Image (cartoon, rainbow, N blue to C red):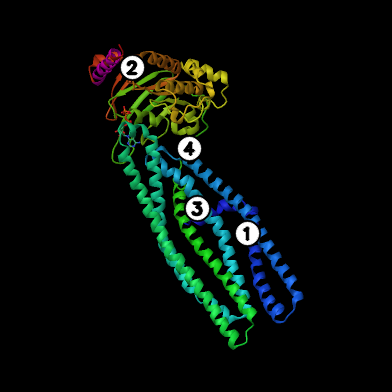
Amino acid sequence: MNVFLRVLPYVRRYPALAFGTLACAVVGTLMVIVFPTVTQYIIDEVIRKNQPQMLLPLVAIGLASFVAQDGLNGIRIILNNSFEQRVIFDLRSELYAHIQLLPLKWFDNRATGDIMTRLIEDVTSVERVLIDGIEQGSVSILQILIVSSVMLAYSWELTLVALLPIPLLAAGALAYTLTARSRYRQHRKAASALNALLHDNIAGIRQIKTYTSEQREHARFDSASEALRQASLIVMRAWAIYNPSMNFLSSVGMLLITGYGAYRVLHSGMELGVLVMFIVFAKLLYDPVGRLHQLNQLFQSGRAAGERVFEILDEPAETDEGAGNSSALVKGEVEYRHVSFSYTEERQILKNISLHARAGEMIALVGTTGAGKSTVINLLTRFYEYGEGDILIDGRSIRDFSRHDLRKSIAMVTQESFLFNGTTAENLRMGKPDATEDEMWQALEAANAAEFIRRMPEGLHSAVGERGIKLSVGEKQRVSIARALLKNPPILILDEATASVDTATERLIQEALDRLMTNRTSFVIAHRLSTVRHADQILVLDRGQIVERGKHAELIDLGGIYARLSRLMEDDASLNEATRD
Ligand SMILES: Nc1ncnc2c1ncn2[C@@H]1O[C@H](COP(=O)(O)OP(=O)(O)OP(=O)(O)O)[C@@H](O)[C@H]1O
């Protein structure tokens, strides 16, 4: 994968900015030959041939060249910044868009901190390579060509002497480049690992505090930080050898010119002004060589970062191939036909699941932990793709719907209601982007959430904190019920909370849920007997298979797993009641 060729299309989108930057750089570079030439004239014509009237015009020419050079440099920097920020924006935006299209399976195997590092740090690094690389690289090469051509025009011998260290400089650069890849990869990996750990620990700060594992976590942090320190030092040490060696070779080149030039002035009558001019030229020759080395370092770091950025962009996104025109109106009849599924190749999770929910029915999924209840509903939203069998809504395979239409027809209320770090109104508008304040209040009333939202300092517009941290579990759940009510889909997935809330809150939540479930097909992962009792169908899962199905009374009569589970749920309920009393 050639990282540079991959970034090029982003750069090509802004031809005017690219051209402007390069033009300023090239013209500015051409100006560099003015000063050495002026110096030579001042020494040989003004001083040695005693022509003082030429001094002022020559100084004016030098000044004009500096004004032009630095003026153009200023414009170049402005253009270049705006160019690079646009490219960074585009690349980041495309990367984010692509990340949103990746299947959940991809996220299961990634650390959030790693994704963040790629999106924020790596994108910047890869882009700088290209823009700075193209601009400074071409300017440096141009400067080397211009300066060496002018030098050649004056004296091929002196030019040859000046160029003597060039093969060694090239060999040094090559050696650095060939070994740099693994160093920079290691460095990016260590930075990512540290970010991932930090993200995880900040999200889990409550657990760290309750388990008083601050010291252990600090040690883990330091160990990741140490890995980054080592990786950074390896990069720096290589640079510490490479950069001074290259500078040394450049200085030797300058010395060779000065020595050989002085010899020519003494023995072959070369003008002193030409020698001084050559010394200035040699400086102008080796400066861009130094810049090319710096650029090489940037290139190697950008290449490692680019690999990480394009690795994400190359991940296949979820597609809607074969999706027809789905009608917006879904009645909500759901059917699973012999569905099997596995997250990984090693282990099959669901085996031959068949179920039929008529529109408006409530289906309760019960079973021991790990039986596969969440997996059954994960397939309905196409969070994961089932292998065998098919799932149909209103008689059509869910693969015939676009994911967008499919997910518009389903709302989910999970145990750990996730609210985004914004206001209640912003969270509610996820359900209906154009919801009016009245509609939001109606939904909050129906979800028994209006009262506590009204009490907040800015009501609907009060911030709820990260993951809704400023609200209680019961409050969060009711806001998420209001959000689902605003979405108003025909199908509902409900993962009943296992956490016990006080009786009054439980009643409020239950009322809200009853309103939410009315006239919708609902799949409820049930933990309470009161919920399952009312279900139109109860499906009992055991190790990925439906082992019992029917209504509460039928399953109790059967005397199987459900009868046992319901006794446990009953005990739980009475235990909760007893504790509350
Ligand atoms: N993303 C995943 N990747 C790999 N395996 C998974 C994943 N999610 C769940 N599993 C496995 O699939 C099995 C079924 O999990 P699932 O979450 O569906 O069970 P569940 O019945 O909902 O359990 P619980 O009541 O505890 O939530 C479990 O053994 C679990 O380890």
Does the rendering let one see residue 106? no
Determine whether, in the image, residue 109 is placed left or right of residue 276: left
Mark before the other along the chain sequence, 2 or 1: 1
Asked if the residue at label 1 sits under 8 Å from ligand 1, the reply is: no
Question: What's the CA distance linking mark 3 and mark 4?
Answer: 36 Å
Label 1: which secondary element = helix
Residue 195 quadrant: top left
Determine whether, in the image, residue 44 is placed left or right of residue 363: right
* Ligand 1 position by quadrant: top left
Question: Which percent across, then down, holds residue 34?
Answer: 67, 70
Pick the front one: 129 or 566 = 129
Depth-wise, is mark 2 or mark 4 nearer the camera? 2
Residue 172 quadrant: bottom left
Q: Give, as a single range, the part of the protein colored magenta.
A: 561-578
Question: What's the CA distance linking mark 2 and mark 1?
Answer: 71 Å
Label 3: which secondary element = helix
Question: Which percent across, then down, holds residue 314?
Answer: 45, 48
Depth-wise, is mark 2 or mark 1 nearer the camera? 1
Question: What's the CA distance linking mark 2 and mark 3?
Answer: 55 Å
Mark before the other along the chain sequence, 2 or 4: 4
In this picture, is 521 found above or below 399? Answer: above
Question: Which percent across, then down, holds residue 49?
Answer: 72, 82
Rendered image: mark on residue 532: 2
Question: What's the CA distance linking mark 1 and mark 3?
Answer: 19 Å
Label 4 CA crowd tier, 10 Å (few <14, some 14–19, many 20+): few
Q: Amino acid at mark 3?
A: Val
Residue at the spot of label 1? 22
Report the label total. Answer: 4
Residue at the spot of label 3? 126
User: Which quarter of the rendering shows the C terminus?
Assistant: top left
Rendered image: mark on residue 322: 4
